[in-house]
Image (cartoon, rainbow, N blue to C red):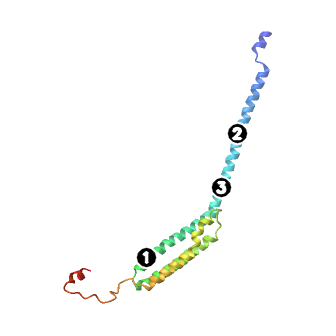
Amino acid sequence: MDVRRRMAPPRSASVAAARWLVGVIAGVALSFVLATLISESLATSVANRAGAIITNAMPSIQTLSNARGDLRQLENDFERYAAAPADARGDLRTRIDATLQTVESNLVSYAALPFFPAERPLSLPCSAWARRSAAMKEAFAVLSASTSTSLGPGRRSTETTPKTWRLASTT
């Protein structure tokens, strides 16, 4: 009988091994549950931030992008206006006035949109638009008053003498 007891494993060792096995399985299951909860929480956070971008940032980006394109168009039109003959300036003037109104409208729309917490200080250059617009209108008035082609010298050319005729002919 002593031989049988020695050959059979003790009962307490098998119970301890079973407890360890159950503990390891429970730990793995708990790890999977925690990992799932953390990943779901992160996914919800990403979805919320994406929603904030869609509802808050995208309208601002679109409005400012439109204003930027209009400003480029305005710059090109100003250059064309300065180089255009007087008879071609009417259409350009109408186009410039319309573009100025569109830029102003875009910036007013942008100011009415919701801002991210740190966005308002970055938008201060847009609030200076009224000052820049007034400066552009003054420049426009100066361009309108000036001529794009030369009307010739303001006075008669200087008389040349025999000693300086070559100098006068080269200038």
Which three-letter amino acid code belongs to the residue tagged 2?
Ser
Residue at image point 74% right, 29% down? 20
Determine which of the numbered discs, if any, sits on residue 47 in the image.
3
Q: Where, quadrant-wise, is the N terminus in this rendering?
A: top right
- Binning the other alpha carbons within 10 Å of mark 1 as few (below 14), some (14 to 19) or many (20 upward) gives few
Where residue 25 sits, quadrant-wise, is: top right
Above or below, 85 against 65 in this view is below
Badge nearest the viewer, 1 or 2:
1
Check disc 1 and report the residue beneath it.
Answer: 79
Q: Position of residue 128 (x, y in %)?
A: 57, 73
Q: Position of residue 47 (x, y in %)?
A: 65, 55
Q: Position of residue 132 (x, y in %)?
A: 53, 75
Where residue 29 sits, quadrant-wise, is: top right
Secondary element at tag 2: helix
Proximity of marks 1 and 2: CB atoms separated by less than 8 Å = no
Check disc 2 and report the residue beneath it.
Answer: 31
Towards the viewer: 71 or 11: 71
